[in-house]
Amino acid sequence: MGDAGTSIAIRSDRTGLAGVTPDSGCRKGVAANTPSAAGGVESPIVQTSVTVNGAPREHDVEPRLLLVQYLREVVGLTGTKVGCDTSSCGACTVLVDGESVKSCTMLAVQADGAAVTTIEGLAGDDDELHPVQAAFREHHGLQCGFCTAGMVMATVSLIEEIPAPTERDVRLGLEGNLCRCTGYHNIVQAVLAAADAIPQTAPETTKAAP
């Protein structure tokens, strides 16, 4: 859980995304390559439909466009940061169908049909902070703030998976998110406090048949 999104990570190289064909990961058809007016070949375009923070979004994108670039440059949500571009720092972490994913390791077309939540979508309709955001503020779990969005999103996923984490759970769960300022102590305390603040859903009990 700590290195969220590694199961769908795609290795990048100088020529683009290695091993990714124009139609890989796409649920909708890819337009065929068409000659350009200059005699070259235009890049294929894919129609992508993604729900971002509860709002449906439809765009025509290049198959090689990363999800983090889509969110920042196409949708205009810049709270998701670009840090290392190598899936090491976790600054770009978002939720895809509730699971934390490093959005620099996922193509926008792979999110077609999915629900994506960014840091901008965590607060309530009345702008009340999410318990994780409130805990990070109260326990000073940030300094420069560059890693905070990714750290918060990873924490939301962690608490969903482990509602009552121990300190060890937190440190292991966030090992894929790097912070160069805080020394992590306050972040760990913020995560533990957030877990305490989020009501836990009691498991349903099945009534025995008479």
Image (cartoon, grey):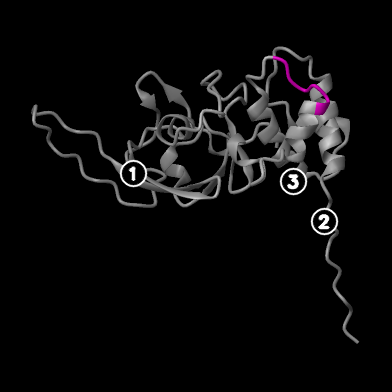
Residue bearing the label numbered 3: 160
- Furthest toward the bottom, the residue is 210
Label 2, label 1: how many angstroms apart (C-alpha)?
41 Å
Query: Taking 77 as reference, is 175 left or right?
Result: right
Amino acid type of the residue that numbered disc 3 sits on in the rendered structure: Glu
Amino acid type of the residue that numbered disc 1 sits on in the rendered structure: Asp
| Image x and y of residue 112, in percent | 44, 48
Q: Earlier in the sequence, mark 1 or mark 3?
A: 1
Q: Quadrant of residue 195?
A: top right
Residue bearing the label numbered 2: 201
| Image x and y of residue 16, in percent | 37, 25
Q: Earlier in the sequence, mark 3 or mark 2?
A: 3
Residue sitting at 84 percent across and 20 percent down?
Answer: 185
Query: Taking 175 as reference, is 76 left or right?
Result: left
Label 1, label 3: how many angstroms apart (C-alpha)?
33 Å
Please state the extent of the stretch shown in magenta in the rendering: 138-143
Q: Which of the numbered marks, if any, corresponds to residue 23? A: 1
Magenta region includes residue 141: yes
